[in-house]
Image: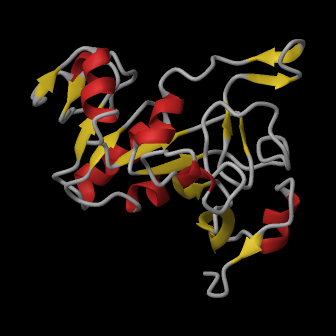
């Protein structure tokens, strides 16, 4: 998952990183094929070049040799809402076929089975980043036919739904799971590549809907 996500990043892009697997993917890409990748962390580090993998967005390793350290409001207002972020990484407890993400509740909103951390800055990233990469372990539980709450909009109901609402960014362009890679066709997820040893049947068994499959499936 990490190496597949890293390959999606292009040299010179400005990336809103986050933590966890996206953090690993971004730092791997910077060390291998994208040395001019500009890493921005919501804690305020701009152009971070950590000598070791940071363990959190507040890790001091992010500050050393960075271009600047800004306030969180500057990161969101100037960089993200200012249209300066090329790529935003997002994760979630649930993702649907349109790339909409849930990080709010499992179950009914008023009487949830589980209350999740919420949006943080994810909704703003989903709307404003030029493109979004989603990374998540795949199962029917995490990829249901209908998510319990839309925290961060993907392609909403497909087609030009995002454009009709005036959203700046293009939305999710790739979903990277532990089974396969997906792109989006008319706003709906489409299987483009299977990881080694994974069959299409296994992918289907771990989705809450029948997936579209690219004609040149790798």
**Residue 50, picture quadrant:** top left
Tell me where residue 204 sits by quadrant.
bottom right
Q: Quadrant of the C terminus?
A: bottom right
At a point 82% along the width and 32% down the height, the residue shown is: 148
Residue 152 makes an appearance in the image: yes
User: Where in the figure is residue 23, as x and y percent of width and height?
Assistant: 40, 37
x%, y% of residue 202?
A: 82, 65
* Residue reaching furthest to the bottom: 216
The number of callouts visible is 0
The foreground one among 155 and 102 is: 155
> Viewed as shown, does residue 193 lie left or right of 37?
right
Identify which residue, 203 or 108, lies in the foreground: 108
Return the x and y of residue 160 as percentages of the image width and height: 60, 60
Above-or-below relation of 135 to 44: below
Residue depicted at 31% across the width and 16% down the height: 72
Nearest to the observer: residue 19 or residue 126: 126
33 vs 209, left or right, is left
Q: Which residue is pictured at 51% across the width and 51% down the height?
A: 171
Look at 84% across and 44% down and name the residue there.
146
Tell whether 136 sits left or right of 73. Answer: right
Above or below, 110 relative to 92: above
Q: Is residue 1 visible?
A: no
State how the image is colored: secondary structure
> Does residue 138 appear left or right of residue 1 in this picture?
right
Q: Percent position (x, y) of residue 193?
A: 61, 73
């Amino acid at each position: 998952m990490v190496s597949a996500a890293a390959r999606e990043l292009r040299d010179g892009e400005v990336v809103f990183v986050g933590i966890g697997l996206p953090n690993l993917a971004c730092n791997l890409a910077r060390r291998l094929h994208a040395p001019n990748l500009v890493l921005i962390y919501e804690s305020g580090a701009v152009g971070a070049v950590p000598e070791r993998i940071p363990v959190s967005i507040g890790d001091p390793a992010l500050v050393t040799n960075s271009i600047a350290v800004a306030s969180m409001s500057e990161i969101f207002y100037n960089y993200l809402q200012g249209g300066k972020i090329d790529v935003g990484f997002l994760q979630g407890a649930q993702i649907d076929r349109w790339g909409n993400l849930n990080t709010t509740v499992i179950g009914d909103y008023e009487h949830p089975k589980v209350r999740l951390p919420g949006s943080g800055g994810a909704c703003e990233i989903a709307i404003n980043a030029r493109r979004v990469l989603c990374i998540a372990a795949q199962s029917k539980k995490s990829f249901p036919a209908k998510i319990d709450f839309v925290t961060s909009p993907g392609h909403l109901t497909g087609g030009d739904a995002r454009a009709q609402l005036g959203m700046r960014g293009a939305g999710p362009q790739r979903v990277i799971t532990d089974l396969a890679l997906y792109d989006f066709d008319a706003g709906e997820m489409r299987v483009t590549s299977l990881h080694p040893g994974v069959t299409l049947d296994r992918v289907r068994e771990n989705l809450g809907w029948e997936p579209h499959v690219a004609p040149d499936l790798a």
